[in-house]
Amino acid sequence: MSVDTILEQAARPQGLDALFRPRSIAVLGASSDPRKIGGRPVDYLLRGGFTGAIYPVNPAQPTVQGLPAFATLEDLPAPADLVVIALPARMAEEAVESCIRCGAGAILMFTSGFGEVDEEGRARQAAMAARCRQAGIRMLGPNCLGLFNPADGVFCTFSASLQGTWPKPGGIAIASQSGAFGTYCYTLLHQRGAGISHFVATGNEADVDVAACIAWFAEDPATQVIVISIEGCRDGARMRAALALAAARGKPVVAMKVGTSALGADAAASHTGALAGTDAAYDAAFAEAGVHRAQSIEEMVDVALACAAGVFPPGNRLGVITISGGVGVLLADHAEARGLDMPALPAAAQSRILELVPFANPRNPVDATAQVVNDRTLLGRMIDIMMEGDGFDIVIAFLALMGLSERAMETLRPMLARLRAAHPDKLFILCFVCPPATRLELEALGFLVIEDPSRAATVAGALARLRARPAALPAAPLPPALPLPSGPLDEAAAKRLLTDAGIRFAPERTARSTEEAVAAAEALGFPVALKVLSADLAHKSDVGGVRLNLRDAAEVASAWEAMMREVAAKAPQARLDGALVAPMVTGGVETVLGVTIDPVFGPLVMFGLGGVFVEVFRDVVFRLAPLTREAALAQLHGIRGLPLLQGARGRPPMDLQALAAALVALSDFALRHRDALASVEINPFIALPQGGVAVDAVILRREAG
């Protein structure tokens, strides 16, 4: 997709310049006490050296913190780019009207007592946002902690975090729905020496949400890395478009997603809905845009700092050199779990390392042993050998406590500087304990310093994936939504719909009696499968409604009678409309294709190893519709059982292109019927060396209302 199309999809937010980079700021409810909510923004703006106009608005005071105060917004000498509302909830709505009358550029509302309280508060909040939209004014909040932009001296927040840590300008932008969570992350980044381009807490998000902030940061020249913290989002399309824009602009996004959002009872009636769980849609949205989803605050800080350093490895080949064999094994374990490849050194390189230290382990990880403590030049010589021939993209060096020895650092400093200069495109991570000054010195050279080897492996894996993130994403306009045909959606009806959508099914016939079942089997050829036909049974095998490998007419007749008795006993309320007779398909791998409709992001497409134990193995990957052929192929490669499809144990490889085509067809079908569907499941879809066929299908409607 072209960048222009992505920009169009992102619906670039208008008016956010006035929010993030205002030239004049009014504070409604400004206080002379810098400890109060209305006083802190004025105090911070003065301390931060804001060069624009600051307009305290307080009818009870002629001056506020040494600045002339104004009784109302209408008394200002000129409309303010940004108006900060620090007033009680009962006064907030009139304040918004005043902003509109005076032509404010944007509104930032600290005030709480709206959507976070009750339904009435949500209605008042929505009404304020609607009035702002009509007037072309963007509103941040209500119930938000505000924002700051250190480079421009903009500090429109009441956060106490700035009392103890004053931010310096830098390349990391932070957008958090939670103010306290966001300022905690900012503080941790600040303590690690990071500079901030922008911080924003979006609060109730009546208008400006995290997605709008991402889109603005993507276009901001000062921002290199975007860090987000969300509990959820209301508009999945806008979030996907914003993340796509960040990817197109080369801005890595590090995300913390907390909380859950249930997919609904209807979706849980299928394997797909049960396996989707609570976060699969967010994982899919992040995956398609190359976002790194952190599992802890520590990881989020580590990865954000690493991204800000600006060295992304060209590939995922990891070389490890260590003075501890045990740490080398630990790193090897973590590397595999994080998708890093650890190729062995060439034989010639191994021999040269053994010439230096005969009792070293020269493969990879390279165990240099404690001998490098006695002769510190050995470390540099070994790394030089490792780096010959372009065998590694990432090098992690575990040096334990060497960073605490100034004598050791006298040897290491020039060696490390030479190494960095010789390999500017490689990622080097040093795992050792060192004083803060040494850390800053090495980070200035372009090294990452991470004490914990496990964290180092996590960062290495994250940067390797972020380096390969997509430059742009498919986001074609949605097709018109179509209804599903009326009437029961039993297996036969589901298969007809999906066949029309382009998915290939095995041949079959419908039988209404024992005699018809035998005749169908004889026409199709033995062995056959017999499956009860009922719109009321999503999982027929659970009630005895499936019989497989029936080899002759007698077995078909016997199976029919036994199956109908068992199903009637186990599911007495189910309507039985006969059975389907189909030939057995052999020589393939059972997979599952599915769709469930996420309430935020829409159709969520599943692929994995299939069969009756799909929920036991849980080897599935989710992606959001629409799918391209390339995205579908990448989804196939995401399952752990991929070797089964590629030809494990001498078996022929399956036709992955046919599988991808089926996923794309299912994705398109789900998009067309997104408003009528609850879920779709094709289980199994049998992948074959040439092509593939589906043998079962379930379509569940969305319940009205």
Image: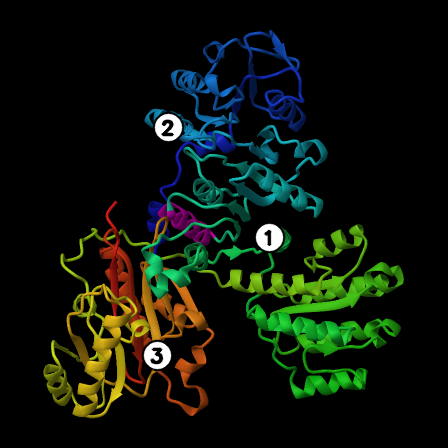
Residue position marked by numbered label 3 in the rendering: 590
- Viewer-nearest of labels 1 and 3? 3
Magenta-span inclusion, residue 242: yes
Name the foreground residue: 158 vs 701: 701
The first of marks 2 and 1 along the sequence is: 2
Residue position marked by numbered label 1 in the rendering: 300
Element on which disc 1 rests: helix
The first of marks 1 and 3 along the sequence is: 1
Amino acid under label 3? Answer: Glu
Element on which disc 2 rests: helix
In the rendered structure, the answer to whether residue 382 lies left or right of residue 575 reads: right
In the rendered structure, the answer to whether residue 520 lies left or right of residue 191 reads: left
Occupied quadrant, residue 397: bottom right
Residue 303 x/y as whole percent? 60, 55
- Above or below for 73 versus 558: above
Residue 268 x/y as whole percent? 36, 59
What is the crowding at mark 3: few (fewer than 14 residues within 10 Å), some, or many (at least 20)?
many
Q: Residue at x 84, y 62 (%)?
A: 409
Report the magenta stretch's main SS.
Answer: helix
Which span is picked out in magenta?
Answer: 236-249
Name the foreground residue: 651 vs 378: 651
- Alpha-carbon span between mark 2 and mark 3: 50 Å
Residue position marked by numbered label 2 in the rendering: 123
Name the foreground residue: 669 vs 439: 669
Looking at the figure, which quarter contains the C terminus? top left
- Above or below for 632 versus 649: above
